[in-house]
Amino acid sequence: MNLQTLLGIELPIIQAPMAGVQGSALAVAVSNAGGLGSLPCAMLDTDTLHRELAAIRAQTTRPYNVNFFCHQPPTPDAAREAAWRARLAPYYTELGLDAANVPAGSARHPFTAEAADLLAAFAPPVVSFHFGLPSPELLARVRSWGAKVLSSATTVAEGLWLQDHGVDAVIAQGLEAGGHRGMFLNQDISTQVGTLPLVAQLVRALRVPVIAAGGIADARGVAAALALGAAGAQVGTAYLLCPEATTSALHRAALQDASSRHTALTNVFTGRPARGIVNRAMRELGPMSDAAPRFPLATGAMGPLRARAESLGSSDFSPLWAGQDCSGCSAVPAAALTRALADVGAPR
């Protein structure tokens, strides 16, 4: 079964869910253009999630995807948190912030029974997960309204695990991809491989369709993935300059600057490896730091630094998530970009 038949879409293009830089508007635009628009839900409270789902349902009758994290919330480690705050203290002083008033916790939450209850009223046709899958009970809830289930794999072992646990398709997240690594069987970065080798390996190993993700910036990248046997492509970074995205002005400027050619995996913003444009925080604190609290707790102490720096026009402490190829970023409507990625009416 090809991806279009499986998901009920016209084009083999999935817009990657990108928390913090988009809402329902981008998802609607992509779905209405024939691709699969995605809504990132890990940072949405219940009321906001309900509003966003209502907005999608009001603006499209096409299939769409809602995406959730499946991480296990860590037990807070007071000693590690104190060490992390001490490491950040000079920056608090530099920016005139009170280190004694650092907030705790994070806005990133895993999929819950409460979220499943809310989703049931909307019955989204596709539900995708990052960092594995939820409990069998929660997954059964998602299946109960007929949703197709997708999840990210960064290794063949993860792809086989997801297939054994009943996903309808596996997203092959290569090392080039922007944002958080979807790795969940272990946290060994040396296991991570590029998109094209990962796609080729997963296509050979799996019975379910494989969706390529990471470093795909244009129709040629999509074609390369399809040539290796992928059923479709998931694209994120290329959409960041679209008018429907909520990407900040500082992030947009970084994407259009030569600095966007230098990305790296870092854990200093959230506590988990994620790819972004290298900035001051990544250079001076990491990019991978043993001091950072476990995901997503590192976010708490970094948040005030980000807010103050951004208010001063600086992205020194901002997570500028981006993949290794930003060349496809363009300030064009998401519908046009979606069709161009599928080489439908693409400029010659």
Image: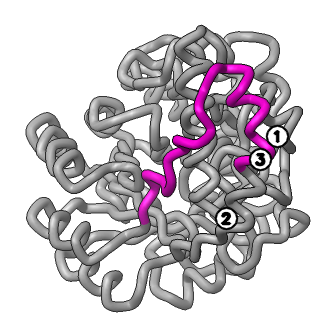
- The vertical placement of 98 against 11, above or below, is above
The residue labelled by disc 3 is 86
- The vertical placement of 151 against 137, above or below, is above
Dot 2, crowdedness within 10 Å: few (<14), some or many (≥20)? Answer: many
95 in the magenta segment: yes
The residue labelled by disc 2 is 294
Q: Residue at x 32, y 62 (%)?
A: 126
Q: Is residue 324 left or right of residue 218?
A: right
Instruction: Report, in whole angstroms, how far the alpha carbon at label 3 lies from the one at label 2.
Output: 16 Å
Q: Is residue 329 left or right of residue 29?
A: right
The residue labelled by disc 1 is 264
Q: Amino acid at mark 3?
A: Ala
- Foreground tag (3 vs 2): 3
In this rendered view, identify the residue nearer to me: 117 or 281: 281
Rendered location of residue 325, percent (x, y): 74, 30
Residue 224 visible in the current orientation: no
Q: Which mark is residue 209?
A: none
Magenta span: 85-109
Which numbered disc, 1 or 3, marks the residue that appears first in the sequence? 3
Q: Amino acid at mark 2?
A: Arg
Q: Residue at x 81, y 36 (%)?
A: 282
Residue 326 visible in the current orientation: yes
